[in-house]
Image (tube, rainbow, N blue to C red):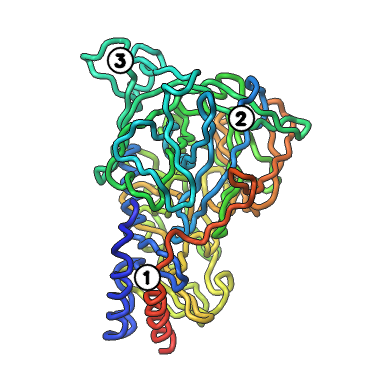
């Protein structure tokens, strides 16, 4: 999940030694471990894969007025760049008096949960330059614990989202435990309390609204969730379960059964997140696969430079062990094994003649001084109903290093055994509409720094401004997690200088 901070400087020195002693191939260690030359602390893709894999296993793969129907608007921070932030998060206000919590935007899970006080293993600081908070239900006048006898707990028990022991009394707290594949996890109990949010009305005015929702109160975290480099207060699950905030607000008549996001791909990141349907002429839609725990789509084929690849379509069929899902809680993209090699080979064959190709331990990398758009091909994913998703070079490449005007790019898509997962790397710089009422998903390429028109269940359009502001109202910028030492950065520059001059 999150890489150890202390090991990075030593890893860069090891890379330098290998580069100085060996040939060009020796300068490339294990898959995607090269740190960019900028003075930022990088994250090797192995750690990104481990973080994503752990989450997949764990998932089975201001006081405001009363609630007013309209478009609910959430701020978005973070970015898809794994060397800057590597996740997108928003802010939610909970309790009375209200406190603000930073939570990761995750369409691959269902439940909103935040760290509670007291908490064992919960980080108290974050490398994301945000102030972490702890929710205390005893300090909120509107908070109540959900007992095991509650119908909402009973429904969650059937889907594995809740935990009550046979020996528990009906009044025992409705608990939960989410365990990740590497042993990391979180556990706690469900509470009901007031959530405050901004509702955009048809007259383009914003109203302060509130509603009572059920969410998780985590009092224990373990493993990589204890680390501080990308720590947030919790996770905001946007799944289809009855206990998801999306479902709860819809049942209360607060918001439509649709939500949309547009995640900015720039290093400063940010974007749009609304409970409502973004209206954009270029949107294309494909059906959601019914009766699935995730947002499953039917991927039918892949093309590179307009040429469809020879891939057995049965690899994309939906079952318990395979299929294609959209998951904003995943950093990278995971392509099913039988489709991975044809995709990588087609990309390598279609690059500009000026691009140098380097393969190290199964990872395809490229060295180029040209622009990424002119040097690399565009791919296309085709879904049921003819919906096409454009995959630009920035959606499948990760920049690993620079020296003067020369850039090292490596394939950021990973090989998967069974399930294809479309994570932030391909979701960025696109509008995505999750139309749950009509069981369909739509998307379109878009500049997510621009404002959008959004429609609610009333059918009226609202104008949503997507400016990025921090708690004090000023723009938030990211300059990286923790800078590497100057000496290490210079050593890395020497590595690429020697390599690129050959």
User: Viewer-nearest of labels 3 and 2?
Assistant: 2
Quarter occupied by the C terminus: bottom left
In the figure, is residue 106 to the left or right of 385? left
From this view, report whether residue 81 is shown above or below residue 152.
Answer: below
Crowding near the residue tagged with mark 3, few <14, some 14–19, many ≥20 C-alpha atoms within 10 Å: some
Question: Closer to the camera: disc 1 or disc 3?
Answer: 3
- Write the residue at 29% across / 36% down: 120
Which secondary structure, mark 3?
Answer: loop
Residue denoted by label 2:
62
Q: Are marks 1 and 2 in contact (CB under 8 Å)?
A: no
Q: Quadrant of residue 359?
A: bottom left
Q: Are marks 3 and 2 in contact (CB under 8 Å)?
A: no
Residue 218 in view: yes
Which residue, given by chain and number where applicable, does mark 3 sit on? 172
Q: What residue is pinned by disc 1?
A: 34
Seen in the image, is 352 located left or right of residue 496? Answer: right
Number of marks in the rendered image: 3
Q: Is residue 178 visible?
A: no
Position of residue 194 measured from the top left corner of the image (x, y, whole percent): 53, 23
- Mark 1 and mark 3: Cα distance apart in space: 50 Å
Outermost residue on the right side: it is 203
Few, some or many residues within 10 Å of mark 2 (<14, 14–19, 20+): some
Q: Position of residue 447 (x, y in %)?
A: 65, 54
Which numbered disc, 1 or 3, marks the residue that appears first in the sequence?
1
Percent position (x, y) of residue 88?
Answer: 50, 48
Residue 313 x/y as whole percent: 41, 50
Q: What mark, if any, has residue 392 been given in the picture?
A: none
Residue at screen point 57% across, 74% down: 371
Picture residue at 52% right of the left edge, 35% below the top: 100
- For marks 1 and 2, give the CA distance: 45 Å
Report helix, strand or loop for mark 1: loop
First of labels 1, 2 by sequence position = 1
């Amino acid at each position: 999940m999150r890489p150890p901070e202390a090991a990075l400087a030593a890893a860069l020195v090891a890379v330098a030694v290998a580069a100085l002693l060996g040939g060009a191939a020796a300068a490339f260690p294990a898959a995607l471990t090269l740190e960019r030359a900028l003075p930022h602390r990088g994250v090797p893709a192995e750690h990104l894969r481990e973080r994503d894999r752990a989450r997949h296993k764990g998932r089975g793969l201001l006081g405001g007025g009363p609630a007013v129907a309209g478009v609910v608007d959430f701020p978005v921070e973070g970015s898809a760049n794994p060397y800057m932030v590597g996740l997108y998060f928003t802010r939610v206000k909970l309790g009375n008096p209200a406190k603000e919590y930073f939570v990761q935007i995750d369409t691959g899970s269902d439940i909103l949960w935040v760290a509670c006080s007291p908490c064992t293993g919960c980080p108290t600081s974050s490398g994301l330059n945000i102030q972490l908070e702890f929710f205390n239900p005893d300090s909120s006048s509107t908070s109540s614990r959900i007992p095991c006898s509650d119908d909402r707990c009973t429904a969650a028990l059937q889907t594995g989202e809740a935990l009550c022991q046979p020996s528990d009394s009906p009044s025992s707290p409705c608990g939960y435990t989410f365990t990740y594949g590497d042993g990391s996890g979180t556990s706690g109990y469900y509470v009901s309390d007031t959530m405050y949010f901004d509702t955009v009305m048809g007259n383009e005015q914003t109203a302060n609204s509130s509603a009572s929702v059920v969410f998780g109160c985590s009092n224990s975290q373990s493993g990589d969730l204890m680390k501080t480099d990308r720590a947030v207060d919790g996770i905001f699950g946007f799944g289809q379960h009855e206990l998801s905030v999306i479902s709860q607000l819809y049942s209360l008549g607060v918001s439509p059964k649709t939500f949309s996001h547009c995640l900015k791909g720039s290093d400063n990141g940010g974007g749009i997140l609304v409970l409502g349907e973004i209206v954009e002429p270029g949107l294309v839609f494909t059906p959601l696969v019914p009766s699935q725990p995730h947002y499953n789509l039917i991927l039918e084929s892949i093309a590179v430079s307009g040429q469809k690849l020879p891939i057995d379509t049965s690899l994309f069929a939906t079952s318990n062990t395979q299929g294609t899902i959209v998951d904003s809680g995943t950093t990278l993209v995971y392509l099913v094994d039988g489709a991975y090699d044809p995709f990588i080979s087609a990309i390598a064959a279609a690059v500009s003649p000026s691009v140098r190709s380097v393969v190290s331990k199964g990872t395809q990398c490229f060295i180029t001084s040209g622009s990424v758009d002119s040097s690399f091909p565009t791919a296309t994913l085709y879904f049921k109903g003819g919906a096409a998703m454009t995959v630009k070079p920035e959606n499948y490449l990760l920049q690993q290093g620079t020296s003067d005007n020369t850039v090292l790019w490596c394939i950021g898509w990973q090989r998967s055994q069974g399930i294809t997962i479309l994570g932030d790397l391909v979701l960025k710089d696109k509008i995505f509409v999750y139309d749950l009422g009509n069981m369909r998903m739509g998307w379109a390429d878009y500049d997510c720094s621009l404002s959008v028109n959004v429609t609610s269940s009333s059918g009226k359009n609202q104008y949503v401004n997507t400016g990025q502001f921090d708690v004090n109202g000023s723009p938030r910028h990211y300059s990286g997690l923790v800078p590497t030492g100057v000496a290490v950065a210079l050593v890395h520059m020497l590595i690429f200088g020697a390599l690129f001059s050959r």
